[in-house]
Image (tube, grey):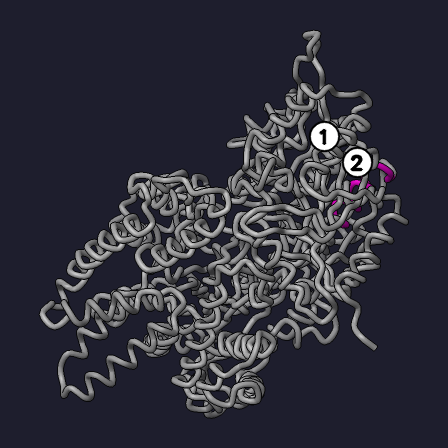
Amino acid sequence: MSTQSELALELSLVAQLVENGYENVFIKNETDLLSNLKTQLEKFNERTFTDEEFKQILNHLTRTTNVFEKAKILRDKFSFKNADNETVYVRFLNMEHWCKNEYQVTKQITVDGKYQTRFDVTLLINGLPLVQIELKKRGLELREAFNQIDRYKKHSYHIGMGLFQYIQIFVISNGVNTKYFALTKKPDFKFTFYWTDENNRRVSDLESFTKVFLDKCHVSKMITRYTVLHEGDKALMILRPYQYFAVEKILERVKNSPTVGPSKNGYIWHTTGSGKTLTSFKASQILSRIPKVDKVVFCVDRVDLDYKTTLEFNAFSPGSVDGSDNTKKLVKQFADPSVRLIVTTIQKLNTAITRERHQKTMDGLKDKKVVFIFDECHRSQFGDTHKNIVRYFNNHQMFGFTGTPIFTKNAATIKRHKVTTAMLFGERLHTYVITDAIKDQNVLPFSVEYTGRYEYKDNSRSNLDIDVEAIDTAELLESEERLSKIAHYIIGIHDSKTYNRAFTGMFCISNVKTLIKYYDLFRKLKREGKHDLRIATIFSYTANEAPNSDTGEIPEEDLDFNNSKVDIHTRDVLDKYIEEYNQEFKTSFSTKDSQSFNDYYKNVAKRVIDKEIDLLFVVNMFLTGFDSKKLNTLYVDKNLKYHGLIQAYSRTNRVTGEKKSHGNIVVFRNLKQATDDSIELFSTLDAKETILIEPYEDYVEKFDQAVATLLSVVPTVSSVDDLLGEDEQLRFIRAYRNLMRIKNAMETFVDFTFDSLSMDAQTFADYGSKYLDLYNATKSSTEKKKESILNEVDFQLELIRRDEINVMYILRLLAQNRGGDESTRKKREQEILTMVSSDPVLSTKRELIEKFILENLPTVSEDELEREYEDFLSVERRVAFEKLTAEEDINPELLQKTMDSIEFSGRFPTKDELVDTLNKKPSFRKRISIGERLVVKLSEFVGKFMEG
């Protein structure tokens, strides 16, 4: 039995959509699309438009090529004056009653751009293409459909009137697996989502997905209600299914629940890192628009989270929130009926409703409908605020969000009673645990390495001779000898853990006293030249609260210390560290007041996110509520358990790119049982296999199996050249790509070495060079024939790129190689150049590097190397630029403007834009081939002189 073809899949999908109420319409090209758009907009707006009026509408729809701005145009009304000077209003989408729109389906619309493109299936809402469905036949990777859409974005959607830039939702399917996503500036397959039911069971086959997700009302609802226009990133964000169901559950409860009793409240358990801020924003935003709700109050438990949440809410929707800097301002917001959504801290909220001086203003709110949403509602301090809210507000509802709920097992005992999340907030409305998130690839699993003396470990480099548990903590766990061994160990492994600082790390330590010892040790080792890590620290300079040994809760260190008891010695030490920070980063922070310290906190957070700090030392701060995709390693010399442990580990598991396959946890305490217990408490049965990645030995076995598969396709490196046809090349690409993925995951293990593997490093690199050759051949092809199937392959160059290697690194290696006999020197030179060839960026510069070696390297000192190379590169770039303009008869000024635009915006010009730089404009027949040639030549120039 043959597999279902792409055409059969397409016809089946269209038939199902028609059965679901879509009108099947034949649209061949843009002319048909515009004609249909006029008809549908007339139908939707219940009026006819003259040709002149429709021209005004089109001018409005096409006034920008910016996808984000078009998303705003789609959601707004448009008005213009008609021939009779009457104001005419045009709607493009019914935002409030999303089912009341006009729905059509069409297939194979043709667009003539750089390539002639036919879009598989397009859903038109009110005549505009708002949903694009890209299909691949069964058996092909889903990623290939994603890559196809990425190419459409670059080459096709902007062509003509650019109406395809109005697409809000993309759907990709091979029949068996189906995912959806919104297009972003930098598309990433990791941010494509499966739809699920309310219980997180996937709806993955195309037929089921079409029935549920592409239902007319549902897909409109996802566009109008559950797509967020993120002003900060200028990007569209579409909610994932668990976010959708959580918001819907809260809305349902607010609209339909009784006004009294525990059943009116509820909480959402969504694992740390799954996007609770976006979910809670969407819930808050929609609730604030419900007429019967007077106020929505979003409560956080720290000053820094108040600032961060306000910032994020306003990035989602500018002006939606005016953060309350102090209690007086908060009370004023409560009194202002135009302020529907408030973000504040529980401390300020508690003060507002308990202090007598605010009663006169606040009493007017007692009978108003107020909905409270609590972030991180597992904190124990919610107990008192909860009681005060219940006593004060007569018509309130409360909802909590948490990644780690409080159950009886990890609950604190308050006045002889254990207080759980359910006791405070009532029924759990929706659940999305860490195993769900890892399965969906919304967060990453952890690699936990227990470093120290353990009976169950032998022959491992992580078998460090240090105590991991002791009765006399102060004497053994905090001894100078132990701390020194750990410091040297971290310095030795940090680069491999962070892929040569492509990512950053955090070191959490048991208390401030020990942190100071560690930090001084790292400072001393840096002065001695033992490491060059950029380090920073932040901690409370008040009397420290110890973690709760029963519950595992990490104490929250508020940044407002004005009324706190200050530890003078600790404060002086921290000021010394901050002064060193100021010198390094040209800042001027201190602990002189809460505001300056608060600003220091924000600055440290930003520099960790921006990878300007390699290793951050903390006690409690940053272990909860801090998100950085570039943080991938946590070193732990601190006892953690239950929600404190999961919260801390989860700092490392944010998804970003292919290289970050898991979060690294390096533990210097005996936390194995605590880790196992925490995983059991906060996930499903048999969760360890999902949450913790396999041991190194399993990866060795996987690697060797992948090598065997590769060798069955290409027994030798040279045999790659003998592959016949694209199908065989595709087998090699997939086999080597799988090997790269496994090796990428193995590299962060301290035991990683090629010595124990069935392929040595040189052979692996040589196959990598052939892999890159195929990539470059695919990308540089200009033939206008049937598109290569290799065009649809994701080569995942991120996995092959060596982040620590750049041109200067290579040249310094070569400069250090100038001594010794000629044969040894030549051999080493060839090895280094092979390394260049196997790097996707540096391979384009090999010719330049070889020329510099021949003409300049023998006489240049190492100190002058960088300046000499920059001078050399400048000359070569000018020569190449002049050669390009002369060969193609290009206007140099226009080409230079194009180059400047590439450097400034990163956007590569279109074929037509390059043709416009020519002194003599070619005929229409020649324009296409000349444009393609210019694209190739400019790509080579950019790769050689402007990238990397």
Residue name at image x 78 percent, y 29 percent: 39
Taking the spot 71% from the left edge, 37% from the top edge, the residue there is 33
Between 308 and 224, which is closer to the camera in this rendering? 224
Q: What stretch is highlighted in magenta?
A: 245-257
Residue corresponding to mark 2: 98
Percent x, y of residue 318: 57, 32
Dominant secondary structure, magenta: helix
Residue 188 falls in which quadrant of the image? Answer: bottom right
Question: Residue 647's spot in the image, x, y percent?
Answer: 58, 60
Q: Label 2, label 1: how many angstroms apart (C-alpha)?
A: 12 Å
Q: Is residue 255 magenta-colored? A: yes
- Queried whether the magenta region covers residue 660, the answer comes back as no
Quarter of the image where one finds residue 650: bottom right
Dot 1 crowding, Cα within 10 Å, few <14, some 14–19, many 20+:
many
Residue type pointed to by label 1 = Phe
Query: In the picture provided, is 699 more to the left or to the right than 171?
Result: left
Q: Is residue 236 above or below residue 16?
A: above
- Is residue 919 shown left or right of residue 757? left
- Left or right, residue 716 beside residue 198: left
Q: Is residue 936 visible?
A: yes
Badge 2, how many Cα within 10 Å: few under 14, some, many 20+? some
Residue corresponding to mark 1? 92
Q: Are marks 2 and 1 in contact (CB under 8 Å)?
A: no
Quadrant housing the N terminus:
bottom right
Relative height, residue 544 to residue 603 (above, below)? below
Q: Which of pointers 2 and 1 lies earlier in the amino acid sequence?
A: 1
